Structures are given as structure tokens and as C-alpha cells.
């Protein structure tokens, strides 16, 4: 067993050192598939505009790599694992797709990863949060780009505990991502002297949160964590406001995308503290990119998923160029060997386990009177360096 | 584990709110079934249509909530009338299975169209200013709009029940279900009556849609999610029984609320458990007459 | 009698041509697409046994598709069975569930039968949503296709395709035999006139129950096979939409005809595949809905039914008694 691991590692290392042995570009083109929820609860945070972000990256890269054209295919997975996995299989087996980007609902990503890992195709996870892709079900072909549940929980939950919020209640999206987020956050709460007094699990796409909000209210919690995202986050916060939960407990949005913040009235979400992997108005670099993004998308505010999809595509193409091939293993090795550096990936390295370690940001949502325009959402309170933001790599997932 | 009375009462009240929607939708379904003997699978789509009409009216015509409350049910009712006249009537003589499948097809088309036009992520509709705020009931805070939903739906349901069971118009309707030929003999225009009744039943779904717009997000699949539940309610109440549909609608909302307190995971399924039990023990439903 | 032989011959000719086509198809079409089609075609055939040949609309057949998939998936993942055994066990589990459903529901008729089966299927859905072994909303992922008879690697799409084709042929033949057996004749008698069948001394409920169990078993077989093809089983298969979809396939192809469900499944799967990519995805429901409406209004016999009707009217002499 040990020997075989060693051999594999050696083989991988050899590939990394000698890319010249690899076979060049398969099928005379590099094709990237973008799989995401296009019109559902997660449509705004990635969706069609993730496809646009990937196209932007391809254009910025020059449209060709090693003299071969780069193109994009996309599909709507409707957050259903069966649809996502079938599409990924079809793309890889019959449409020559070399890498898959987008990837929002963790349940879908898990199913897609099974197919892509077996076919040795890289997946660039720009939207999903479950930390299993670099732990329990890690693979040499996973590149988990934008953020994960560990970075969210560490960035958001810890400061709340320090501020004296000790009794927690969870309203959790009932699938892989929500479960993972609740588990990690619970770990942090309990090891810092807090308690979890209860949790309610709501199906993805729930529109009426009244009964879950009532459960939270009767639990006596002083912090209610929303372990959900997209429209689910918007609707659950709306319900909490309607039934007066916001008056008796602090609402904690564990995963909030800029598109969600923008969709909620400033009076409701103002002053909330949250963690994000990207904010458009951080520096000149991000502002310039976001300006271009908004021009292409009819004014949609770029989320960290959009920025992640752009950044991961750009880095992937750079790695293809450096490796001289689009063969999965060689490209992944290159992606880990060279450091990405763009408007999203700051002080970043793709770790051996496939986790992109980069700066995360602890932000405060601006109140109505602080906002200069509709997109003026956050004040960055703290930059969390990558090494602190993410979890440690586990030895089983060291694919160097 | 003791029972947290406040929490329980809160869930029961939320159940009552949901039950109001169920009652309103089930009522429309029961009226249509009572007279035409067909199951209108498009009732959920009509509910969605009602919500979208209200939303579109506000977006593009500046139609406020109160106006929508009156206009939208009429518009949706007209859609229902057209549907009955041109699609349902041609196959009225066929097996009722076909009208069920026909309305299912119509529902798919409507849902697909709105999904295509507006995405499925949902649009939000602001609660009208006059109905914002709420009451502190001691055990929970009741938003005024939720109270309004209960009020409107109870008034409408009672009104419809009273009209059908206690008035002359209702007597014609009931006679129409029993013996249309005889009624025609008395000079009543039965086909017209059927068309109007269908429109009325569908209009009720439109009304429910307007009521729902401010509290649920307005989305293409809002109708398909609730339809199957409402359907179960009509069956439990006894198909075609107006009072049965109303009482069962409210009752099932409350049962759901109870389940949410004791075993939240089962809350979406409890209605089907009741349905299986009722059908096994009393096949015609709780308030239905044995066929 | 002569007519009967002729009808048999035309069936076997059609079947033979189709089989040759099916054997060659993977050279032209992506095999996973073909396998998906075969699984749904088998599912629709199983459903048609109830609707078309007994005249009972089950609105809960998704439960059997999902049961076959989940049971086979669970056994394959955890006990390293060979696929042929896994599939058979999935089918048996589904048959058992079908027996339970049937025992509770065959007493009811028409819309009430549809309602009982729907309600029971909803309970099954709830069970699969909550039971830990199914993975809930995440689905049961990573089901191995395994080695057929312990030595044929089904990981290869082509091998898998011929395995699925074999299963389809067996399932289809089973249905064909059932319909043409004396048992099938009794079923048809029940469909035409239940009171008469009763008065002739047939235990109508037992016949209905038997048909329901066979139908459930084959639906389970389709689900088990599908789970292996996609190496995944999910709640989509247990959802009531799936029960509606199989009605659409059967109705579109022609209920009560032996080939109808196959044709219906082919059309539905083809449309779903063509429109599944990118921007066109939204049109699927509109088109499916429109097909439903047009079918009900104008082509209640379905594609195969209308075709046969046309042939009968125009070639009365040749095809007068073909009624399968």
C-alpha cells in the first residue's frame, strides 16, 4: 500500500517535472464546461454570469492556448445531482470537455467530481462550499477555488463568539453544503465556550421560512446562524425580519454573496458582519475588472463566485500553456506549481490538496446612510491571510 | 422533554395561515370537480399566474395591491373561461382521465413559459403599506399581513360556501351536477353555467396567488409545489364537497403546524399519511358521499 | 387463428428489425443516451401494463423506479455484489413494495386508485428523503457498475450498453408474454368489463394485484439498471413528477399497445436531450406541455395507436385483428 502511494506520488512528480512527455492538446481544442444553477435559487450568485466570467478569462488570455482555440459549453444543473452528473459524463465522454467550472451546489459538485475524477479531468469549483472536496473525498483533480465552509465559519463565527454571543441556533439548507457548514461552525462554537441550542433544516429552495423562524425564536438563542445561500438566505432573513426574530437575536449570515446583500433592504441587513472571498470595490484592480464585468452582464454585481470562475479559468489556461498539454494530471500539477495572481487571487497558492489558499475578507455591511450608490455594500474590516482563513491540509489529501 | 406552549401555538398559527391558502385553492378545485367532474391539474399554475399578474401589474402598470386583489382574480378567471371553452369542453365526453392529463399539460406549459421569462429564483413583492407591522399576541408576533391572509380567505371561503349551499344560484349549480339535462329543460343555460363556474373556481386560485405574492416569492414553480398538497386535501375532504374542502384545507394546515412542532421532518408528508388512512377507511373522503 | 399467427409474425418481424438496429446503434449514438432511453422505455412498458392492459392509472410508479435504484445501489456499494445479482435484488425489492401498494390500492377504482398510489408514493418519497443510506438531497453517489458475472467490466460504456439492452429485452419479453398469456387475456377482460369478468368467476382483485406486482417489479428493474448506468440514484426518480412523466411517455406513444411506450419514451428522451443544453433548457416544459395538450385533444391513441388505426382503416383486410 505504502509503496503504491509512493509510486503514484513519484509518477505525479515526474509528470510535473517533465511536461514535455505529455501529449499536447487533445482534439485540437481546449473546451471548458460551465455547469451551474442557471435560473434557480443560486442563479444570481453564479449562473449565466459565471459563463460570462469564464468567457472573459478566455478573452483576456488571448482566445487560444498553444495555438489551439478555447471554447465554452454550459448547462443548467438545476441543483440536481443526477442532472449534473449526467451532463458532466456526456461532456467528458462525448463532447471532449477538458475541465469543468462553475459548480455551485455542493451536492451536484460531489456527483460531478465522481465522474470527473474517474476520467482524470480537472474541476474548478468556483461556487460550492463544502470542505469535503479537499478532505473526505479529495482528489488530485479537484481545485476548490473561491472559499469553503471552514473559512466562512472561522471568519464569521469566531468574532461573534468573542463578542459574547454564546447560544446559537442554525437554520440550515438541508443538503451537503448546509450540513458541512453547520458541522464546522458547531465545532468552532463548542470549542470556544458556546453552545448550539438547536437547528432546523430547510429544503433547498424553501420560500416560506416562518415555521423555521418560530423554532429559532422559541429556542432562546442569542445568535441565529443562516447556513444557507442565495435566495434561501434572502428569504430566511426576510422571514426573520417579518416575525421579529431580528429583534431578539443577532442574525449571522454564514454564506452571503454580494448579489444577495444587494437584494435585501439596507435596513434589514445593514451592520451584519460576514466573510467573503472577493469584494469588487477593494482596490483599483478589482474595480477595473468589475467595471468590465458589469458592462458585459447588464449591470450585475460581481460575486466572489463570478470572480472565482474568472480567476480559476485564467489560472487553468496558464497551467495548460506552461504544461504544454491539456492532459488532466499534468495541468493540475502545473496549477499547483505556479502561483495565481489576479484581481481575485491575492497571496494565493493552490495547495497540494486542491485548496486555493488566498486572502479572505471580513466585512461589515454598510447601512443605508453610508451607501454612496447601489453597489456600495461593504466596508472591509479585516483581511484574513490565507493561512489563517482555511483549514490545515490533511495528510491523506497531499497530492504533491 | 416538556412542551413549549408558546412555540406550539406559534406553529399552529403558522399552520392556520398555510391552511387558509389550502382552503382557498381546494375550494376552487372542489367547485370545478363538483360541477364538471374533472380534476383541474392547472389550478396550481393559475395560482402562480395570479401571483405573477399582481407582480407584473405592479412592475409595468403601477397597479397597486388593492386593485390587484380585484382585477387579477377576474383576469385569471377569464383565462380559465377561455381554457374551459376551447380546451376542456371539446373532450368533456371523454374519460375524465383525459381532462386531468390535459390540464396537467396546460400547467406544464404555463410553468415553463414563466420559468423561461422570469427564471425560477423568484421575484419579491412588497407588503402594502397599510398591512405592514403586526400584533404581539403574547406567544408570538403576528405580522399583520399574515392575519390579513386568514381573514380574506375565511371570508371568501364562507361566502362561496354560503352561495352554493344556501342561495338560489347555488341550487342551480347543485342541480347542474345532479342532472344537467333536467336543468337545461327548465331553461337554464347549462354550458354557460359550467363555463362561468370553471372561471370562478380558477379565479379563486388567482386570488390566492395575489394573497401569496407578498409573503412567498413569486416564482414559476410556486404552483406545482402546492398543487399536489391541495389535491390531497380535496381527496381527503371528499371530492366535490365544498365544505369538506374548506374544513380539510384549514385542518390540514393545522395538522402540518402540529407536525412541525413535534417532528418537523415529516411536516411535508403528514398530509399524505392522512390521505392514505382516509382513503383506506372512508374512500369517499371525510365529507364525501359514497359514490 | 390465421390472423393471430399473422399478428405474431408482424410482432416478431418488428422486434427483429429493432433488435438489429439496437445492436448497431452505439456505433452512431452516444451509448449513455441509448441506455437512458432503454431504461425509461422499460419503465414506461411496465407502467403501460397497468394503464393500458388493466385500465388502471397508477400515479405512484416513481416509487418503484426509485426503489429498484436505491436498493441495487445500496447493495452494490456495500456488499460488492456482481451487477446481475444487484439488479435482480433491486427488482425483487420493488416487487415486494408493489405487493404492498397493490394490496392497499387495487380495491379502489379510477381516480381513487390513482390517488391512493400517489399518496403511497409520497410516503415512499419521504422515506428516501429521510433515510440515511440514500444521502437525501445529495443522492446516492458513486454506485459501482461492477463486473458482470465477475469478469466483464461494465465500466466500459459499450459493455454496459449490451448489458442494459439484454435487460431491456428480457423485461420487454416478460411483459409481452404476460399480455399474451391466458393471464393477460383475463386482464383485458377486466379492462373491458370488470363486472362480467367477476361474474365469470375470476377473482378480479387477485388478477389486478398480480399485474401490479409484475408492473412494479419491471419498473424496479428499470430503476436498478438506470442507477448502474449513471452510477447514481437520486430523489428525482422518486418524485411525483416522475410518475407524471411516465404517463406522458405512455400516452404519447399509445397506451395499450405493446410498442407505444417504447416510442413515447424515445420521443420524450430525445426532446429532453436536445433541449437540455444551455439556453434551450427552458423550453423543455413548454414543449412537453404542448405535446400533452395536443395529444389529448387530437391524438388520444398516441403515435403507435394512431398509426395502427390508420393502417386498419386503410388496409382493413390485412390487419383486421391485430390488437396487442
Image (cartoon, coloured by chain):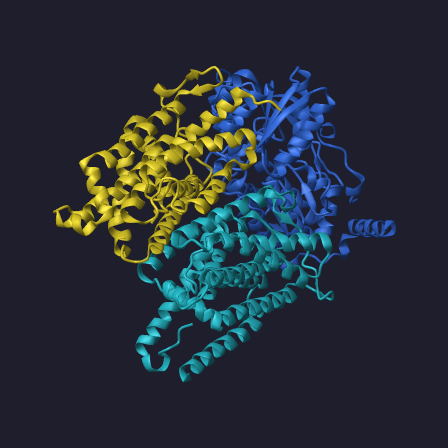
Please name the color used to draw chain C. cyan
B155 above or below A165? below
Q: Position of residue C244 (x, y in %)?
A: 45, 52
Q: Position of residue B126 (x, y in %)?
A: 39, 26
Residue at 52% x, 53% y is C101
In the picture provided, is A351 more to the left or to the right than A307? right
The yellow-coloured chain is labelled B
The front one of B156 and C261 is B156
Q: Quadrant of the C terminus of chain A?
A: top right
A187 above or below A333? above
In the picture provided, is B110 more to the left or to the right than B182? right
Please name the color used to draw chain A. blue
Q: Residue furthest right?
A: A3
The front one of C257 and C142 is C257
Q: Position of residue C208 (x, y in %)?
A: 47, 61
- Based on the displayed image, in which of its 4 quarters is residue B46 positioned? top left
A215 above or below A58? above
Residue at 42% x, 58% y is C56
Q: Position of residue A179 (x, y in %)?
A: 64, 35
- Based on the displayed image, in which of its 4 quarters is residue B278 positioned? top left
In the picture provided, is A372 more to the left or to the right than A358? left
Amino acid at each position: 500500500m505504502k509503496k503504491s502511494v509512493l509510486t503514484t506520488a513519484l509518477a505525479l512528480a515526474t509528470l510535473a517535472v517533465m511536461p514535455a512527455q505529455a501529449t499536447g492538446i487533445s482534439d485540437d481544442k481546449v473546451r471548458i464546461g460551465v455547469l451551474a444553477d442557471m435560473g434557480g435559487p443560486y442563479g444570481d450568485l453564479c449562473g449565466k454570469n459565471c459563463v460570462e466570467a469564464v468567457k472573459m478569462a478566455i478573452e483576456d488570455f488571448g482566445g487560444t492556448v498553444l495555438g489551439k482555440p478555447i471554447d465554452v459549453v454550459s448547462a443548467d444543473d438545476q441543483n440536481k445531482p443526477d442532472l449534473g452528473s449526467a451532463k458532466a459524463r456526456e461532456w467528458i465522454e462525448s463532447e471532449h470537455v477538458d475541465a469543468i467550472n462553475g459548480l455551485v451546489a455542493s451536492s451536484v459538485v460531489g456527483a460531478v467530481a465522481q465522474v470527473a475524477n474517474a476520467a482524470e479531468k480537472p474541476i474548478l469549483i468556483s461556487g460550492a462550499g463544502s470542505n469535503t472536496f479537499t478532505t473526505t473525498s479529495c482528489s488530485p483533480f479537484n481545485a476548490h477555488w473561491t472559499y469553503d465552509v471552514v473559512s466562512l465559519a472561522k471568519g464569521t463565527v469566531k468574532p461573534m463568539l468573542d463578542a459574547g454571543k454564546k447560544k446559537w441556533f442554525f437554520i440550515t439548507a438541508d443538503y451537503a453544503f448546509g450540513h458541512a457548514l453547520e458541522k464546522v461552525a458547531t465545532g468552532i462554537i463548542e470549542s470556544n465556550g458556546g453552545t448550539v441550542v438547536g437547528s432546523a433544516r430547510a429544503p433547498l429552495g424553501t420560500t416560506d421560512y416562518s415555521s423555521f423562524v418560530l423554532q429559532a425564536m422559541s429556542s432562546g438563542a442569542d445568535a441565529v446562524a443562516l447556513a444557507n445561500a442565495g435566495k434561501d438566505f434572502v428569504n430566511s432573513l426576510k422571514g426573520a425580519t417579518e416575525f421579529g426574530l431580528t429583534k431578539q437575536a443577532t442574525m449571522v449570515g454564514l454564506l452571503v454573496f454580494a448579489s444577495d446583500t444587494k437584494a435585501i433592504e439596507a435596513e434589514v441587513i445593514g451592520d451584519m458582519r460576514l466573510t467573503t472571498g472577493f469584494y469588487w470595490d477593494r482596490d483599483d484592480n478589482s474595480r477595473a475588472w468589475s467595471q468590465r464585468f458589469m458592462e458585459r452582464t447588464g449591470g450585475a454585481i460581481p460575486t466572489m463566485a463570478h470572480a472565482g470562475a474568472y480567476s480559476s479559468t485564467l489560472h487553468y489556461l496558464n497551467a495548460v500553456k506552461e504544461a504544454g498539454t491539456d492532459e488532466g494530471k499534468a495541468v493540475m500539477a502545473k496549477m499547483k506549481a505556479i502561483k495565481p495572481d489576479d484581481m481575485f487571487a491575492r497571496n494565493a497558492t493552490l495547495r497540494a490538496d486542491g485548496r486555493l489558499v488566498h486572502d479572505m475578507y471580513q466585512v461589515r455591511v454598510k447601512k443605508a446612510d453610508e451607501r454612496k450608490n447601489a453597489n456600495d455594500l461593504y466596508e472591509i474590516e479585516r483581511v484574513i491571510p490565507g493561512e489563517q482563513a482555511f483549514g490545515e491540509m490533511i495528510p491523506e489529501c497531499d497530492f504533491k | 422533554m416538556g412542551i413549549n406552549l408558546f412555540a406550539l401555538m406559534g406553529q399552529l398559527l403558522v399552520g392556520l395561515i398555510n391552511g387558509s391558502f389550502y382552503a382557498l385553492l381546494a375550494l376552487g378545485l372542489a367547485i370545478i370537480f363538483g360541477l364538471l367532474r374533472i380534476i383541474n391539474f392547472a389550478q396550481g399554475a393559475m395560482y402562480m399566474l395570479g401571483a405573477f399578474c399582481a407582480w407584473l401589474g405592479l412592475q409595468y402598470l403601477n397597479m397597486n395591491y388593492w386593485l390587484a386583489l380585484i382585477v387579477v382574480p377576474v383576469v385569471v378567471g377569464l383565462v380559465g373561461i377561455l381554457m374551459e371553452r376551447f380546451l376542456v369542453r371539446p373532450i368533456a365526453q371523454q374519460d375524465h382521465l383525459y381532462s386531468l392529463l390535459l390540464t396537467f399539460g396546460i400547467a406544464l406549459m404555463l410553468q415553463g413559459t414563466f420559468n423561461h421569462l422570469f427564471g425560477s429564483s423568484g421575484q419579491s413583492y412588497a407588503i402594502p403599506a397599510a398591512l405592514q407591522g403586526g400584533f404581539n399576541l403574547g406567544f408570538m408576533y403576528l405580522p399583520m399581513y399574515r392575519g390579513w391572509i386568514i381573514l380574506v380567505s375565511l371570508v371568501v371561503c364562507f361566502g362561496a360556501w354560503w352561495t352554493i349551499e344556501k342561495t338560489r344560484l347555488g341550487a342551480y349549480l347543485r342541480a347542474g351536477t345532479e342532472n344537467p339535462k333536467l336543468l337545461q329543460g327548465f331553461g337554464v343555460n347549462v354550458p354557460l353555467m359550467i363555463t362561468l363556474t370553471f372561471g370562478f373556481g380558477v379565479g379563486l386560485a388567482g386570488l390566492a396567488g395575489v394573497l401569496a405574492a407578498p409573503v412567498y416569492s413569486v416564482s414559476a414553480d410556486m404552483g406545482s409545489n402546492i398543487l399536489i398538497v391541495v389535491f390531497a386535501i380535496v381527496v381527503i375532504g371528499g371530492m366535490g364537497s365544498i365544505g369538506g374542502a374548506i374544513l380539510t384545507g384549514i385542518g390540514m394546515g393545522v395538522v402540518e403546524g402540529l407536525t412541525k412542532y413535534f417532528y418537523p421532518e415529516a411536516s411535508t408528508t403528514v398530509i399524505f399519511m392522512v390521505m392514505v388512512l382516509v382513503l383506506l377507511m372512508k374512500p369517499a373522503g371525510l365529507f364525501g358521499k359514497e359514490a | 387463428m390465421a390472423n393471430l399467427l399473422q399478428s405474431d409474425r408482424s410482432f416478431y418481424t418488428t422486434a427483429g428489425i429493432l433488435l438489429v438496429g439496437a445492436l448497431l446503434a452505439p456505433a452512431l449514438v452516444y451509448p449513455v443516451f441509448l441506455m437512458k432511453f432503454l431504461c425509461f422505455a422499460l419503465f414506461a412498458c411496465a407502467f403501460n401494463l397497468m394503464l393500458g392492459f388493466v385500465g388502471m392509472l397508477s400515479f405512484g410508479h416513481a416509487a418503484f423506479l426509485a426503489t429498484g435504484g436505491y436498493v441495487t445501489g445500496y447493495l452494490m456499494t456495500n456488499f460488492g455484489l456482481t451487477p446481475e445479482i444487484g439488479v435482480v435484488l433491486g427488482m425483487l425489492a420493488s416487487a415486494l413494495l408493489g405487493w404492498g401498494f397493490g394490496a392497499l390500492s387495487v380495491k379502489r377504482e379510477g381516480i381513487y386508485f390513482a390517488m391512493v398510489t400517489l399518496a403511497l408514493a409520497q410516503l415512499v418519497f419521504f422515506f428516501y428523503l429521510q433515510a440515511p443510506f440514500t444521502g437525501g438531497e445529495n443522492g446516492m453517489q458513486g454506485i459501482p457498475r461492477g463486473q458482470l458475472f465477475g469478469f466483464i467490466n461494465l465500466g466500459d460504456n459499450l459493455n454496459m450498453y449490451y448489458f442494459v439492452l439484454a435487460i431491456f429485452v428480457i423485461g420487454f419479453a416478460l411483459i409481452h408474454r404476460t399480455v399474451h398469456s391466458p393471464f393477460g387475456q383475463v386482464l383485458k377482460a377486466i379492462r373491458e368489463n370488470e363486472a362480467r369478468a367477476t361474474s365469470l368467476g375470476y377473482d378480479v382483485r387477485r388478477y389486478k394485484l398480480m399485474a401490479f406486482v409484475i408492473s412494479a417489479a419491471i419498473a424496479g428493474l428499470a430503476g436498478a439498471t438506470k442507477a448502474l448506468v449513471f452510477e447514481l440514484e437520486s430523489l428525482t426518480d422518486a418524485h411525483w413528477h416522475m410518475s407524471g412523466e411516465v404517463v406522458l411517455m405512455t400516452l404519447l406513444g399509445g397506451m395499450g399497445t405493446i410498442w407505444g411506450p417504447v416510442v413515447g419514451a424515445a420521443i420524450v428522451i430525445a426532446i429532453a436531450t436536445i433541449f437540455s443544453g444551455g439556453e434551450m433548457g427552458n423550453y423543455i416544459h413548454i414543449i412537453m406541455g404542448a405535446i400533452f395538450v395536443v395529444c389529448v385533444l387530437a391524438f388520444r391513441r398516441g403515435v403507435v395507436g394512431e398509426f395502427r388505426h390508420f393502417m386498419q382503416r386503410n388496409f382493413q383486410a390485412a390487419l383486421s385483428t391485430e390488437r396487442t
